[in-house]
Image (cartoon, helix red, strand yellow):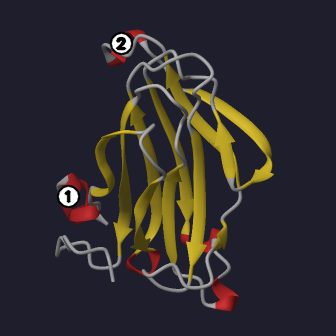
């Protein structure tokens, strides 16, 4: 265990793009599928700019049996962390914890503000008995007004913590 305290972040975790910065009003923004059999948890992050009121992004998680989305279905979650508003420094913005009934989506009334929206998924949250191993974060088209955003994954507690694996996709 002492070796973990000396490990660098990217020896224990990774950062994998779901989708790169895009105007989220142009189409559905389907993230890449990430294979959770390579880690214990994945932090799913949406980072977005100010948009137009009522064009709220719908944070959507799905699970599938492979990286092609085979047999995809909703991945329900209940806990969301958000930073909504003037996100300028860590010192002036704290995480808000939101809980909801189990759902595969979350809509933050954040369209007119900058925001970071995060859901943490544990490998055991997937329907592993039915062979589900992959997770996808997507944001459907947000409406008719420009709103820039990107999404990424932070897989952590890698199965091979000493070898950073840049290809978390199958």
Quickly name the residue at label 2: 91
Please give the name of the residue rendered at 66% of the width and 42% of the height, measured from the top-left corner: 106
Considering depth in this image, is 140 or 128 the residue closer to the camera? 140
| Location of the C terminus (image quadrant) | bottom left
Tell whether 91 sits left or right of 145.
left
Between 149 and 124, the one lying in front of the other is 149
Q: Is residue 9 left or right of residue 170?
A: left
> In x, y percent, where is residue 13?
29, 60
Task: Name the residue nearer the viewer: 109 or 16.
Answer: 109
Q: Position of residue 21 (x, y in %)?
A: 28, 41
Discs 1, 2 touching: Cβ within 8 Å: no
Whichever of callouts 1 and 2 sits on the residue coming sooner in the sequence is 1
Residue 10 in the figure: left or right of residue 118:
left
Kind of element beneath mark 2: helix
- Which residue does the numbered mark 1 point to in the structure image? 10
Q: Where residue 57 is drawn, which disc sits there?
A: none
Query: Who's the residue at 59% across and 52% down the image?
Result: 60
Residue 62, image x, y percentages? 59, 65
Is 34 or 72 nearer to us in this picture? 72
Q: Quadrant of residue 161?
A: bottom left
């Amino acid at each position: 265990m002492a070796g973990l305290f000396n490990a660098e972040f990217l020896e224990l975790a990774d950062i994998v793009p779901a989708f790169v910065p895009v105007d989220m009003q142009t189409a559905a923004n389907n993230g890449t599928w990430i294979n959770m059999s390579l880690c214990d948890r994945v932090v799913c992050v949406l980072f977005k700019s100010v948009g137009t009121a009522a064009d709220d992004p719908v944070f959507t998680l799905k699970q599938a049996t492979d990286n092609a989305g085979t047999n995809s279905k909703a991945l329900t979650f209940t806990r969301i962390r958000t930073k909504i508003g003037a996100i300028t420094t860590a010192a002036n913005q704290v995480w808000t914890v939101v809980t909801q009934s189990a759902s595969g989506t979350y809509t933050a009334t954040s369209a007119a503000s900058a925001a970071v929206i995060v859901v943490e998924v544990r490998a055991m949250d997937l329907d592993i008995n039915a062979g589900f191993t992959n997770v996808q974060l997507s944001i459907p088209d947000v409406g008719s007004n420009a709103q820039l955003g990107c999404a990424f994954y932070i897989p952590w507690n890698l199965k091979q913590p000493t070898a950073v694996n840049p290809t978390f996709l199958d």
